[in-house]
Image: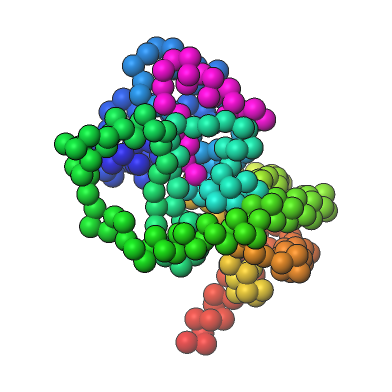
Amino acid sequence: MGALSVTGREKYQNPFKPLVPDCYPVPYGDDKALEDLLKMGGFAAFIVEPIQGEGGINVPPSGYLRRVREICDKYGAYLIVDEIQTGFGRTGYMFAYQADEIVPDIVCFAKSIGGGIMPIGGYIAKEDIWKKAYGSVDKAFLHTSTFGGNTLACAAGIATIEYLVENNLDRQAREKGDYFIKKLLELKAKYPVIKDVRGRGLMIGLEFEEPKGILNKITAGKLSELSKEYFASLVAGKLMNEYGIITAYTLNNPNVIRLEPPLIVEYEEIDKVIFALEDIFEKNGGFLSLGLESGKQVLKSLFKK
């Protein structure tokens, strides 16, 4: 209920309402909207992703987190940074908030700390916050967990951190990400079907343009609606089925595919992705032709069965 209450899409909330009360969203990257809300008083914390993952790999304006830190301090609200997707080297820094040179009050992390092998999650808090929650004998063991402190998961987490640090994978992600984004921007300049390339390090989003021509007008905008919902999944399907490259669209913006290779990816493998994308756009063009081609493949596989 806690996570659902602060997620950004009602589609996932509605079946489980009522949720935790007094949770209010603000537009991402809008520090003025945040201040207008916090100045009303009575807020415990502001929770934010340093780069939005499921929202479509959205990078906030430069200096946004520094301004957020100032606003939270001004109005006495904790700053909680969600690094579930961005943490442990993914964006070119050990944690993405470090790009803005701030210190949050609480950091949530998971996913990559398990090294792609073990499920593990946790959080880091400033000492005074930790003591408020667990700093006395009567509170220290109130919140237990069946799988908390799992020794195998923790061993994987320690090994992952050691490998990240010893091999400077955060720096590698920054350098390889710059190379990857540069190549993708070259594709964008060549193929109008690519609407935007954005991200940092090896957390990259590729957003596709929606059809705007005569066919879209004839269908009263339905073609554009379908493209918005399914184009990225068609591209992801092509990449997987024909080129052996696994990607996925972002849940809250299904018109974006995320490109998030392992931090140990080689430049040759990045080039393979670029080649595959160029091959797809060269042969298939936009949403309609790609959809028809994918439909043919589905029919072929059905008849084979």
Camera-nearest residue between 107 and 8: 107
Q: Residue at x 49, y 81 (%)?
A: 302
> Looking at the picture, how far across and down is residue 77, in whole percent?
41, 22
Q: Which residues are magenta?
A: 62-83
Which quadrant holds residue 199? Answer: top right
176 versus 63 height, above or below: below
Outermost bottom residue = 304
Q: Residue at x 62, y 46 (%)?
A: 93
Q: Is residue 148 magenta?
A: no
Q: Is residue 218 left or right of residue 122?
A: right
> Looking at the picture, how far across and down is residue 299, in whole percent?
54, 77
Residue 219 appears in the figure = no
Q: Is residue 190 left or right of residue 76?
A: right
Q: Is residue 78 magenta?
A: yes
Camera-nearest residue between 120 and 300: 120
Q: Residue at x 31, y 25 (%)?
A: 22
